[in-house]
Structures are given as structure tokens and as C-alpha cells.
Amino acid sequence: MQHYTDADFKNILLEYPDEVTKEQFYRLCHVSKRVASFYLEQGFLPCEKRKTQTHKYVIKTADIVAFLKKRQDEPHQFQVPAGTSRKPVDAAAVIRKYIPKETPIDLILWKAFLSEKLIAFPDVCEVRDICRISGYSKETVLKWCLEKKFIFFNINRTYHIPKKTFIDFMASAEFSTIVQKQPIHLNLLSEYEKWTSS
């Protein structure tokens, strides 16, 4: 990962317009197009999504600078699932490899693993944090909130979700039987298998 100085951040703000496209974003971040899409789709930084074939995303340059600073300070929060920078993950293949259908996951051990794995996240999360934890979209997380899958608090139109209650949901049979698992979810499952065998 490239190291940025304060001078680099100032130059970015001076050299680029107030808003840029995804193409400029991935070049600024020195990542692939797939990784850039992952960051945007998972809510790692704000962006405007337009219904056009080209220049689908519009991102404020100031938000990119804030994102780069945070990624540099807290790199563990910005880990990308294996395969994101290459071809899309074959979800079915990963499930077959790591969690055979005839071997149900031990939900108690899974919960213990999640509690240890997610210790760096705040005790009370916002929706964007839950997206990063689980790999699921903002729309899916909001749907879970509305369906009362876990406890949350609506404060000033912002959902606040106790991490413990979301881990309880992740450790439920309902969450483990999601068919179309997202890459972060699959990556957690593969890490869990290594964790239980170590």
C-alpha cells in the first residue's frame, strides 16, 4: 500500500476537481477497478450512484482524501476479501470447499470466533460498519433492521446497532443458511475453519 504524506493529500485536493469518477478514484488509491467498486459498494466512503452506463459513481475528492487517511491509519478496517481484486468469487465453490452441507457449522464456536475476529470494530456500530463486518449491502442491512433481526436504535435518523446483538444474529441458524453469501461472509467462514483447526 502506498504511503501518503500531508503534502500528497494537499496535492490531490489541488490537482483534482471537487468531484471525480470511479476511474480517477481507483488510480488515486492505487487499487484495481474491482477493489474500488468493492470500497464504493460496501460504503467505505460516500458516493453518488447514477443510473448511467458510464461514470456510474461520483465521489467527492475531499471524501477520498479522508478515506485514504483512515485506510493508512487503520489498514485492518479496509481489508479486501480474497479474490476481490481478481475474478469474482464462486460462492457455491467456496461453500463446498469450506462448509460441506453434511457438516453443519458449530454456532457456538462460530460466535466465539466472530467475537474475537471483530474486536476492532466499535461496540455500537452504524450501518456502514455492519456492511464492512458482514459484506452485505446497505439495503440488506436496513432490511434486517426493519425486520427486527437484531436490536438497533434510531438516533437522529441514524441506525446504531450494538455489535454484540449483530454477532448474535450472525451466529444464528438463519444467517448461516443464507444461500447467496457475499465474499466477506465467505472469507470469514474460511478463516473460521482455519481457526477451529489450529
Image: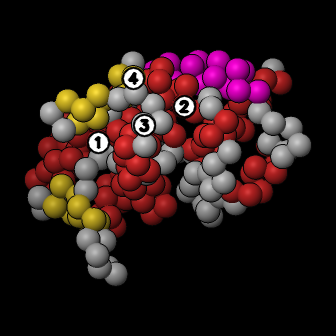
Task: Give the residue displayed 61% in from the left and 40% down from the top.
Answer: 175
User: Residue tagged by mark 1?
Assistant: 67
- Across and down, in percent, residue 115 comes to 57, 19
Residue 133 drawn in magenta: no
Magenta residues span 106-121
| Distance from the alpha carbon under mark 3 to that under mark 2 | 10 Å
| Distance from the alpha carbon under mark 3 to that under mark 1 | 31 Å
Q: Earlier in the sequence, mark 1 or mark 2?
A: 1
Please, what is the three-letter code of the amino acid marked with disc 4? Pro
| Distance from the alpha carbon under mark 1 to that under mark 2 | 29 Å
**Left-right relation of 2 to 102:** left
Please, what is the three-letter code of the amino acid marked with disc 2? Phe
Please, what is the three-letter code of the amino acid marked with disc 3? Lys
Q: Secondary structure at mark 2?
A: helix
User: Residue tagged by mark 4?
Assistant: 162
Whether the residues at callouts 4 and 1 have beta carbons within 8 Å, the answer is no
User: Residue tagged by mark 2?
Assistant: 169
Residue at the farthest bottom position:
53
| Distance from the alpha carbon under mark 4 to that under mark 2 | 11 Å
